[in-house]
Image: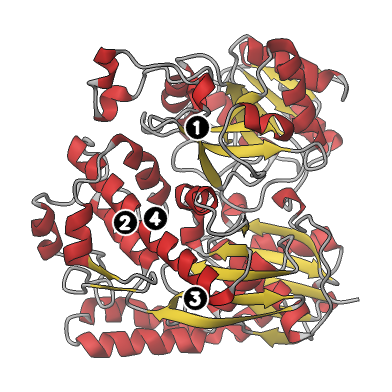
Amino acid sequence: MSHILGISAFYHDSAAALVKDGEIICAAQEERFTRKKHDYGFPKNAISYCLNEARISASGLDYVAFYEKPLIKFERLLESYLAYAPLGISSFLKAMPLWIKQKLWIPDLIQNELRDFKGKFIFPSHHESHAASAFYPSPFQESAILTLDGVGEWTTASFGTGKNNDFRLDYEIKFPHSVGLFYSALTYYIGFKVNSGEYKLMGLAAYGEPKYKDVILKELIDLKADGSFKLNMRYFPYPYALRMINKKFERLFGHPSRGPEAKITQFHMDVARSVQDVTEEIILRICRHIRKVTGRNNLCLAGGVALNCVANGRILREKIFENIWVQPAAGDAGGALGAALFVWYKYLGNSRLTNGRDTQKASYLGPEYSDEEIEAFLKKDNIPYRKLTLDELPEVTAELLTQEMVVGWFQGRMEFGPRALGARSIIADARPETMQSKLNLRIKFRESFRPFAPSVLREKCGDYFELDSESPYMLLVAPVKENIRRKMTDEENKLFGIQRLNIKRSIIPAVTHVDYSARIQTIGREDSSLYYRMIEAFYKKTGCAVIVNTSFNIRGEPPVCRPQEAYKCFMRTDMDYLMMGCFLLDKKDQVPLQDDAGWRKDLSLD
């Protein structure tokens, strides 16, 4: 019996994952425990959870795998600073103390945290960890592999092939040329936070026109037919500075960078669309080249850029590959899982056989709380509730949704990765015209342009969306079917940009984006029986097999993990009900909370 702990840390989205004899036992991001969004610190809480879930101590671990090679990454930083010296002196002085004190001593740091660990440390490269996270849990016995992100050690993109228990990455693009950093730089320019707001840019793109695509391709990036590219580094100071773009970049577009809370204009929407279109073109060219070079029918994807579900959907629709599989935690968090699987399969050489289904366990890999634990929490704080049976729970929830109620849904094991998949979700009816704005402004407290995703019964997906494959991890965007769209009036067709926001576009307007697309999650009974049964009950009541599914959090916070956070989020928003385990909480029955400064800090399961 072999236990392998994988760790990612010190850039963003730190995480830990544990693999036992090749089986994925558990995985979680540190942010869910510390409540610091995208927490990059050492994931001691996530590690503790993994060890407890596996019922072992550190002495029971055979290997600890860290998701990249710190010495090579340090080499890249030093060479970059030297190449641009003395321009990067302020960034150098800020970065070096942390490296010298901490990041160069990863084995010592891990050993100090896991004092009883007697096993071996393994350091796959950053993109090997991404590749392993994509290929090994996939349903494919052999596949092409593509990794795309900001930067690992030196590599920013790579591709190769995997077969059975082995893979190889034969081609790469190196820093500073990076599609991930290119996308992040434009994210910063539009006023969103780097390593956090990229999905906002993707959502905003649908409101714009690609007016700046030619400028980008002419001035910012030299894109070749095979998808290889070079950035014009005269516009991007990130190799040596503490900023992504410079004044020359701003002059190119004729506008300064947007402030974080400044008004979003049509200009910003058009830039977003242009950036998204260029990024899709890069990815599609790379994929066509990979198909030609490798001859594989399947493609596995990982790295932060693989979370661009619009591009993923286009790979499928254009039939570049017959099948694709994207690691649900495609960013750095998934590197922890990939590092652990790398050790089991590639380092130790253990056999691997697939059965047509992935081994990600629907990505329900995080903590779970029993009804006994939840009820103890509710009783301790005198929180009013109604207890339901497992047969009542789906029916009662579905009935609430038919009444246009917004329900917090807290069930089973927490998701691993950035998407809510029906464990820590806020759910609602997708049919009311006002539901999108209600959820954005009264529940999530976020920008009104942000779209919401549908959860749909897998066998009914084709009734609503132009998608031929399943999409259990909400990583594919596809068009809403023509026959359920609403025809626009002449006056509505004249509108542009944000003016198009509140127009009803289909019979499921709350999940139909302004370009008639949707980021789809298909639900199978075997993946999440309770969630499936609830949507099935809603379908039987309404004839609609689609609901809104968004993450159980508010703007600026990570998704909830424990009952305490679920209750606090429920009470701080205009959610109507909370279904937590078998316990139904009605907002009308609750005692209003004090403001945050007076929040009852003793809410706990201790």
The secondary element bearing badge 4 is classed as helix
Residue 271 x, y percent position in the rendering: 23, 47
Counting residues from the start of the chain, the first of labels 3 and 4 encountered is 3
Image-quadrant location for residue 282: bottom left
Residue 464: mark in rendering: none
The secondary element bearing badge 1 is classed as loop
Report, in whole angstroms, how far the alpha carbon at label 3 lies from the one at label 4. Answer: 17 Å
Q: In screen coordinates, is 271 left or right of 114?
A: left
Counting residues from the start of the chain, the first of labels 3 and 2 encountered is 3
Residues at marks 2 and 4 touching, judged by CB atoms closer than 8 Å: yes
Q: Check disc 4 and report the residue beneath it.
A: 280
Report, in whole angstroms, how far the alpha carbon at label 4 lies from the one at label 1. Answer: 21 Å
Q: Check disc 1 and report the residue beneath it.
A: 452
Badge 3 amino acid: Ser
Residue 262 x, y percent position in the rendering: 21, 38
Residue 278: mark in rendering: 2
